[in-house]
Each structure stands twice: as structure tokens, then as C-alpha cells.
Amino acid sequence: MTLVKICGITNSGDALNAIAAGADLLGFIFVESSARKIDQVVAREVIDAVAECARTVAVFKNSSIDDVQRISESLKFDYVQLHGSESPQFCKEVSAPVIKVLELDEKSDDIELSRVIDSYDFCDYILFDKPKDLNFSDWLTRAIDRVERLQLERPYFFAGGLNPANVPLVLSRIKPYAVDVASGVESAPGLKEMEKMKAFCGAVKGTNIDRANVVNEAIS
């Protein structure tokens, strides 16, 4: 079954609701320019609150290796997600399992894209995402087509403007290890909406999910 990563968690309430809705992974963004950025003190509070009910992902973009190591190790994140121009060598220096983001644009053909993917073969996962400057309506179908043509045998994540309405289209064509969502389950940047999270997780997993009892037991 495809897993759900809800990214841009900024507070404990949203984290607990995300888990109750069916999220398997929670993303914490340590990028100054992001509207969903979180500081280390709050991140620690959130991680303590979820009590290992979901795997946690620290998201960085062109940070120094020292910052990546310090934050991921001190807060004991399960994964590090690298969203910038980090080289294969940089990824090799990260001590935690790595999710490397690759944007699907029109600058490279399928052969070049495959070469880039292969250069990150030691990373645990690739995450395919949408470049910020591309029109979404023109991107999603083309992105699905490209990933389908790749016929990847390694596990990967898929992201880029996903929401409860369009994620079934993605899953009808490709089979990612996980789908990643942020704005598609929000009422405002960094503020998650419970009903949207439940709808998204239900659309991915094909059922109405309620893990509130699991969360309550973990925090009691």
C-alpha cells in the first residue's frame, strides 16, 4: 500500500491530527524561506507529542552538512529530505537515511533523468516534485507519464500539488512508495485541516481511516 507523508507540520495539534487521519510520515521543514518552516524547539515538542506514532522527516534545502547533521541527529529524525542542489557526495555524508528530491521539468530528457537518478543510487528514496515556476495543470499528467516511462524498480515518493481530488489519478497510473502533500490538506500555509487530511489519506488508502485511538494510547 502506498504510504502518506504530510509535510510542513508546524505544531503538535496538526501532527496528532495527521496521524489520526492516516499519515505514515510527517515532514518538518527547516528552510528559512518556507512559509511552513519550524524551529528546533517547536520541532522537538511535536516529535515528543507524536510519541513515535509516525516516522519523521527533516526537510532541508541547500543547508550546510553541519546543520543537517546537527538537527537530524539531535532530534532523532528517521529521514533527512534534501530539496536543493545537494550533490551525490553531499548526500553520502548525511548519517540518516536520505530522501533526495528531483524536480521533474522539461530541461532534461528521459535518458538524462535516468542518469541523474542513478547518480543518487545510494539514497534510500527519490522524491519526484514539481518545479515552483511550472503551471500545475500542465505538469501533473506529464510528470506521471515520465515516471511511468522510467519503470523504476527502486522505491520513490511522488509530490507536487497533490490533493484528495487528484491523487487517485496518480495512483491509477504509477505506484509510488509514498505520496507527499502539504498545501493540498491546508486551510492556510502551515495550518492543516483535519477533514482534508482524512480525505487525502482515505483517497490514497481506499478507506476511512481513524487512528485516534493509536494516538491517544501513545500520549496517555
Image (cartoon, grey):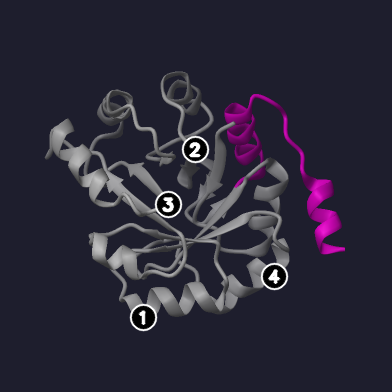
In the shown orientation, is residue 144 left or right of residue 8?
Answer: left
In three-dimensional space, the C-alpha distance between marks 4 and 3, rounded to whole angstroms, equals: 25 Å
Closest to the observer, 150 or 48:
150
Residue at horizontal 33 percent and vertical 75 percent from the top: 65
In three-dimensional space, the C-alpha distance between marks 4 and 2, rounded to whole angstroms, equals: 26 Å
Q: Which residue is mark 3?
A: 124
Q: Amino acid at mark 1?
A: Asp
Magenta segment: does it hold 77? no
Q: x, y (%) of residue 213?
A: 84, 47
Q: Amino acid at mark 2?
A: Tyr
Pair 3/1: label in front: 3
Using the image, determine if residue 24 lies above or below residue 73.
above
Tell me if mark 2 has few (under 14), some (14-19) or many (20+) residues whose alpha carbon lies within 10 angstroms of its own.
Answer: some
Q: How many marks?
A: 4
Q: x, y (%) of residue 215?
A: 78, 53
Using the image, determine if residue 62 lies above or below residue 22.
below
Residue 205 is at least partly visible in this image: yes
Q: Are marks 3 and 1 in contact (CB under 8 Å)?
A: no
Pair 2/3: label in front: 3
In three-dimensional space, the C-alpha distance between marks 2 and 3, rounded to whole angstroms, equals: 11 Å
Q: Are marks 1 and 2 in contact (CB under 8 Å)?
A: no
Q: Which residue is mark 4?
A: 48
Q: Which residue is mark 1?
A: 66
Q: Are marks 2 and 3 in contact (CB under 8 Å)?
A: no
Closest to the observer, 118 or 40:
118
Residue at horizontal 66 percent and vertical 37 percent from the top: 198
In terms of secondary structure, where does tag 2 sit? loop
**Residue stretch in magenta:** 193-220
Residue at horizontal 26 percent and vertical 25 percent from the top: 142
Q: Which mark is residue 177?
A: 2
Pair 4/2: label in front: 2
In terms of secondary structure, where does tag 3 sit? loop
